Image: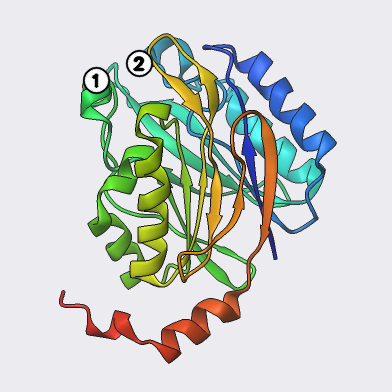
Amino acid sequence: MKLYCCQTDITWENKAANHARVEKLLGANKPERGSLVLLPEMFSTGFSMNVSSIQEGAAAATSNFLAGMAKEFGVYVIGGVVTASGDGQGFNQAAVFDPEGRELTRYTKMQPFSLGAETKHYHAGKGPMFFHWQDLSVAPFICYDLRFPELFRSAVQNGAQLFAVIANWPVTRIQHWITLLQARAIENQAYVAGVNRCGTDPKYTYNGRSIIVDPHGNILADAGDGERVISGDIDPSVVVKWREDFPALRDMRL
C-alpha cells in the first residue's frame, strides 16, 4: 500500500491557483491507483481566519476538487477544507474521498490554535473520525491536534492503525513537528503520516518537512524543504505484528 504526501506552497486565499498547483504536482508524480494521498491543512487558501471569504459555500469548490482528483487518479484523498458553522464562524476540516469520488468522512479539528486566534473564528470538533483504507483503519488529525496525545490515544482505543496529520506548521517550531509525529507513532504503535506546507503567508514561514513514520518511530520518507511529493510503503501486518510482539497498548490505564 502506497501513501503519498503532497507538500505544496499555498497562494493566499486563492482556491483556483492552489487547485492548479496540486493538480500539476500530482500529474507529475502520479500516485498508484488505490493509494492514499494527503494534502495540507487549508491547502486551497492558507491558514486564514477570513472564514466568510474562504468557506466552501454552496459551490463547494474545494470539496468538488478533492472528489475529482480522487476519481481521476483512482486514489483515496485527504485535504483541508473550511465550512461555515452558520453563526459567522467556521469548521477547519479534513475531508476524505474514495477512488469513486465519494466522501467517506469529514473530521473537524478538535484543537483550534488559540495562539493564532483560530479559536475566535473556528469551532472545535467533538471527537476523532475514522475510515478504512483497504485493511487499515485511518484517523485524520489537523496540525495543533498533534500536541495533544490524548486525542490520538482516544483514536487508537477505537482501532486506529494510521494517523494522517495535515498541517500548516511554521518553521520556527519544525523540530517539534518531527519529534511529535515520531512520538505519536511510537506510543500508539501506529503508522503516522504528516503533510505540511512550505512557503509563506502574511504571518508565518513554512519549510515543509512532511514525513512518513512507521510504528517503531522510524522515518520512512522525508520531504525536506520546498514543493514535492513523497511516498512510503504502508504494511498493515507491521502494525498487527508489533502490537502482538510488544503489547504495550494492553497496559493502558483508561
Q: Quadrant of residue 205?
A: top left
Q: Secondary structure at mark 1?
A: loop
Which residue is at a point 58% across and 14% down the rendered structure image? 11
Which residue is at a point 80% across and 41% down the rendered structure image? 29
**x, y percent for residue 64:** 65, 31
Q: Judge whether residue 114 can be spotted in this image.
A: yes
- 195 left or right of 168? right
- 180, above or below 237, in the image: above
Question: In the drawing, what numbered circle is on residue 49?
Answer: 2
Label 1 amino acid?
Ala
Q: How is the image coloured?
A: rainbow
- 106 left or right of 96? left
Disc 1 target residue? 117
Which residue is at a point 53% across and 30% down the rendered structure image? 197
Q: CA distance from mark 2 to mark 1?
A: 8 Å
**x, y percent for residue 70:** 71, 44
Label 2 amino acid?
Met
- 155, above or below 70, in the image: below
Q: Secondary structure at mark 2?
A: loop
Query: Mark 2 or 1 closer to N-term?
Result: 2
Check the picture and name the quadrant holding the C terminus.
bottom left
Check the picture and name the quadrant holding the N terminus.
bottom right
**x, y percent for residue 246:** 38, 87
**x, y percent for residue 222:** 59, 47
